[in-house]
Amino acid sequence: MASQDRSASLPLPLATPAGPADSAPVLDPKIMLASVEQDLSLLRELAELFFAECPGLLSQIRNGVRESNPEAVERNAHTLKGALSNFGALAACNAARELEIRGREARFDGAPELLSSLEREVNRACNALSMFLQEASREGSAR
């Protein structure tokens, strides 16, 4: 008999911020689980893909800002924003959206600061996602 993931019956672990100064959640567990129809195994696969692709996307955005390449900034920020939206990483999505707009408008004023903000928020999202998956695994194995 095939085992079915019963993550819908798991209590949702909190996706808390990486730093004590912030009180807003970094991720939205309801959005994460809804994006994979409550399938925790699929969420793990999606997270693995995100962890594998994210450094390259950030590198392309960084290079695009450094080289004032609006197409690279817009395209890669858009892709990263879409990936982050699967996890309900609102602050990181907003930072990516701002860079996407700057790329579309070929405006690089303030782009290095926006890039720093994006990198910080993506790091927080990655840490929170890792913690969420670890907690969910512990909750699942305790049942």
Image (tube, grey):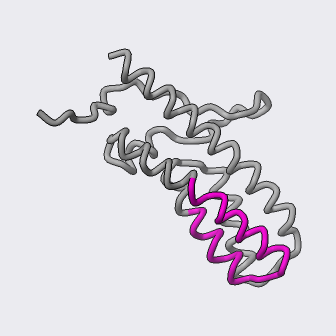
Furthest residue toward left? 1
Q: Position of residue 100 (x, y in %)?
A: 68, 72
Instruction: Please state if 132 lies on the left or on the right of 35 as rendered.
Output: right
Above or below, comparing residue 109 to residue 16 in the picture: below
> At x 57% / y 32%, what residue is drawn?
131
Is residue 74 positioned above or below 85 on the image?
A: below
Q: Residue at x 31, y 33 (%)?
A: 8
Q: Position of residue 64 (x, y in %)?
A: 77, 76
**Residue 63 lies within the magenta run:** yes
Whether 31 is among the magenta residues is no
Quarter of the image with the C terminus is top left
The part of the chain drawn in magenta is: 52-81
Q: How many marks?
A: 0
Q: Residue at horizontal 39%, vertical 51%?
A: 35
Residue 81: x and y in percent read 59, 62
Q: Say which of 133 and 106 sits in front.
A: 133
Q: Main secondary structure of the magenta part?
A: helix
In this rendering, the answer to whether 143 lies above or below 115 is: above
Q: Nearer the viewer, residue 79 or 63?
A: 63
Name the side, left or right, on which 72 lies relative to 1.
Answer: right
Picture layout, residue 12 above or below residue 38 = above
Q: Quadrant of the N terminus?
A: top left
Residue 141 coordinates in the image, percent (x, y): 37, 20
Q: Name the residue rendered at 62%, 58% in the picture.
A: 54
